């Protein structure tokens, strides 16, 4: 089967680009020391995760217990659930652990410590004010650690790295991330509290950290596919983006310079992560059916099942001819969000020939 035969919209994954992306981070971390604990929230697919785990100890990071359940069924036995634990999820975690899955949870407050009881925990450290976590120098960090029955260490996520505007800024953020979590671990050890795990993680900082001294593992997820947000902060090139949405042109508004496709925000997601970047890519960057970018063409607007293609300049005369029936591939702003709209990857390898269909999971 070839892409031209698919009903659209459809999610396309170029395995050759994906494998190069995986190899890139693996090689980089090999020179820095820590193990990689892939974050499978982006992939949500056993076939992709299998390739990420080659040469790694075998542990993964998840964002949902549905992911934990799915990957446990695939034989994964070391899982970090990296969203703050809630009491209504405890029984599910305990059930997984009873079945031999070593699930670790994350917390950052005394209330969570009380109800999580015997479950292994990491304390989340706030390294950048991005969202959750305890500041590494917070007076209550040691008290919180003492309240945790089964403490395994500390973790952090430099989410603010997505807002960096230069590789130097990402390097500095990576060091800020590393320093925060290492300082927190040192404080706990000084008080004779356990901190064998010192975990950091974001795709930008994983690629630009100058040192990971004191860190035991790195978590990253979007590095597998990359996306326009990552390209916009120079973590990757547009050519490194492995994921795209196949769409078909279904009409035109010639006076406006629009081509209309059957891939709206239900296919692309509502994510507009590049809107705050110097180059706004709309709802996605448009390529031909072979994956080559069409100069200046973006999804400038989207309804539920309609995408509007136009030239970023707004000049109708600069739009290429895209007759009804033309297939295009649209690169996503955020691979996690776009992938979540689809049930499967249609796997290609540098051509239009589909070599496999890999199922994805969704939900919570």
Image (spheres, rainbow, N blue to C red):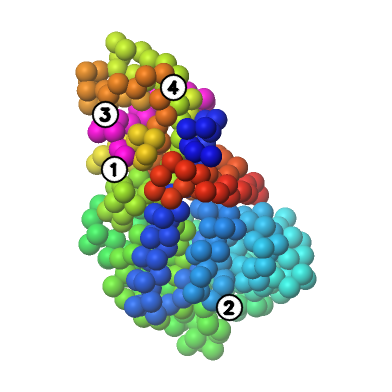
Mark 4 crowdedness (10 Å alpha carbons): few <14, some 14-19, many ≥20: few
79 to 323, vertically: above or below: below
Identified at 58% across, 54% down, the residue is: 45
- Name the mark nearer the viewer: 1 or 2: 1
What percent of the width, then of the height, locates residue 59?
57, 71
What percent of the width, then of the height, locates residue 78?
62, 71
- The kind of secondary structure element at disc 1 is loop
Mark 1 crowdedness (10 Å alpha carbons): few <14, some 14-19, many ≥20: some
What percent of the width, then of the height, locates residue 328?
40, 32
The residue indicated by pointer 4 is 325
The residue indicated by pointer 3 is 312
The residue indicated by pointer 1 is 277
The residue indicated by pointer 2 is 152
Q: Nearer the viewer, residue 178 or 278?
A: 278
Residue 316 visible in the current orientation: yes
Q: Nearer the viewer, residue 137 or 102?
A: 102
């Amino acid at each position: 089967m070839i892409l031209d035969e698919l009903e659209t919209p459809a999610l396309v994954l170029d395995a050759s680009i994906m494998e190069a992306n995986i190899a890139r981070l693996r090689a980089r971390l090999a020179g820095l020391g820590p193990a990689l604990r892939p974050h499978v929230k982006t992939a949500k697919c056993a076939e992709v995760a299998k390739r990420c785990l080659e040469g790694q100890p075998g542990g993964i990071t998840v964002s949902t217990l549905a992911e934990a359940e799915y990957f446990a069924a695939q034989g994964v036995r070391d899982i970090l659930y990296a969203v703050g634990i809630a009491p209504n999820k405890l029984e599910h975690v305990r059930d997984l652990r009873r079945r031999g899955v070593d699930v670790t949870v994350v917390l950052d407050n005394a209330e969570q410590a009380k109800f999580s009881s015997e479950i292994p925990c990491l304390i989340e450290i706030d390294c950048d004010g991005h969202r959750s976590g305890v500041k590494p120098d917070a007076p209550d960090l040691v008290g919180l650690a003492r309240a945790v029955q089964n403490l395994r260490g500390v973790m952090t996520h430099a989410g603010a790295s997505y807002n960096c505007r230069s590789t130097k800024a990402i390097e500095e953020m990576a060091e800020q991330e590393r320093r925060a979590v290492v300082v927190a671990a040192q404080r706990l050890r000084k008080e004779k509290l356990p901190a064998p795990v010192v975990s950091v993680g974001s795709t930008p900082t994983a690629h630009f950290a100058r040192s990971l001294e004191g860190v035991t593992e790195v978590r990253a997820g979007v590095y597998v596919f990359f996306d326009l947000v990552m390209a916009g902060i120079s973590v990757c090139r547009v050519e490194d983006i492995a994921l795209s949405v196949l769409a078909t042109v279904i009409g035109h508004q010639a006076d406006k310079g629009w081509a209309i496709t059957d891939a709206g925000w239900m296919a692309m997601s509502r994510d507009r992560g590049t809107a705050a970047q110097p180059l706004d890519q709309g709802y996605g960057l448009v390529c031909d059916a072979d994956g080559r970018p069409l100069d200046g063409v973006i999804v400038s607007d989207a309804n539920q099942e309609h995408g509007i293609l136009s030239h970023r300049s707004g000049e109708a005369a600069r739009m290429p001819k895209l007759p009804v029936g033309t297939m295009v591939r649209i690169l996503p702003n955020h691979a996690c969000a776009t992938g979540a709209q689809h049930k499967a990857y249609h796997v290609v390898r540098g051509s239009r020939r589909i070599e496999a269909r890999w199922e994805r999971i969704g939900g919570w």
